Amino acid sequence: MDAAFLIRKLQEQREEWCELGDGLRVCFVRPPETEVHSLVRGVGVEHARKYVVKWDGFTEVTVLGEGVGASDPLDFNADLWAALVADRADWLSKFADALVSACNRRHKERKAALGNSAPTSEPA
């Protein structure tokens, strides 16, 4: 297998969906363990832009409002997502909760795995 394929598979293993309400949802990639420290001061728009990679249910109506936009599905665009979520504190809050929960689950899973592993050496 080539490295690009394996990297894509690793990313897919870190993907989770976050429901925003009204039939809208976003898919984000859980940050790698080495980047979790960036969440200490809170989750902001920059995190939403960096970690959200897909969406579902978004249309021009979602962006522009009824009577202005078409109801055709929009392809995901990180810049458009960032512009939308910057003005929707409710979406950012739901995303933040989902992101932090995913990181906490990962931490607990890793801690449990380390706790269940056999010691590598005998104590002196």
Image (tube, grey):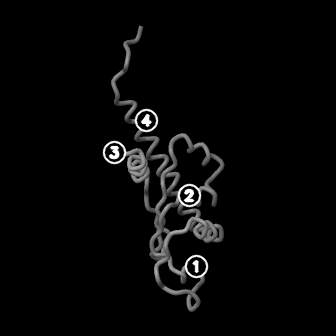
- Three-letter amino acid code at the position of disc 2: Ala
Query: Could you tell me how far apart the alpha carbons at marks 4 and 1 are, in whole angstroms?
Result: 41 Å
Q: Which residue is mark 1?
A: 63
Report the mark closest to the observer, 4 or 1. Answer: 1
Circles 4, 3 touching at the beta carbon (< 8 Å)? no
Name the quadrant containing residue 121: top left
Q: Nearer the viewer, residue 104 or 67?
A: 67
Circles 4, 1 touching at the beta carbon (< 8 Å)? no
Indicate which disc, 2 or 1, sits on the residue closer to the N terminus. Answer: 1
Q: Which mark is residue 1?
A: 3
Query: Could you tell me how far apart the alpha carbons at marks 3 and 2 are, in whole angstroms?
Result: 35 Å
Q: Which residue is mark 4?
A: 111
* Residue 92, image x, y percentages: 59, 64
Indicate which disc, 3 or 1, sits on the residue closer to the N terminus. Answer: 3
Q: For mark 2, give the secondary structure.
A: helix
Report the mark closest to the observer, 3 or 1. Answer: 3
Callout 3: few (<14), some (14-19), or many (20+) C-alpha neighbours within 10 Å?
few
Q: Which mark is residue 96?
A: 2
Query: Could you tell me how far apart the alpha carbons at marks 4 and 3 are, in whole angstroms?
Result: 30 Å
* Residue 112, image x, y percentages: 39, 36
- Three-letter amino acid code at the position of disc 3: Met
Q: Quadrant of the C terminus?
A: top left
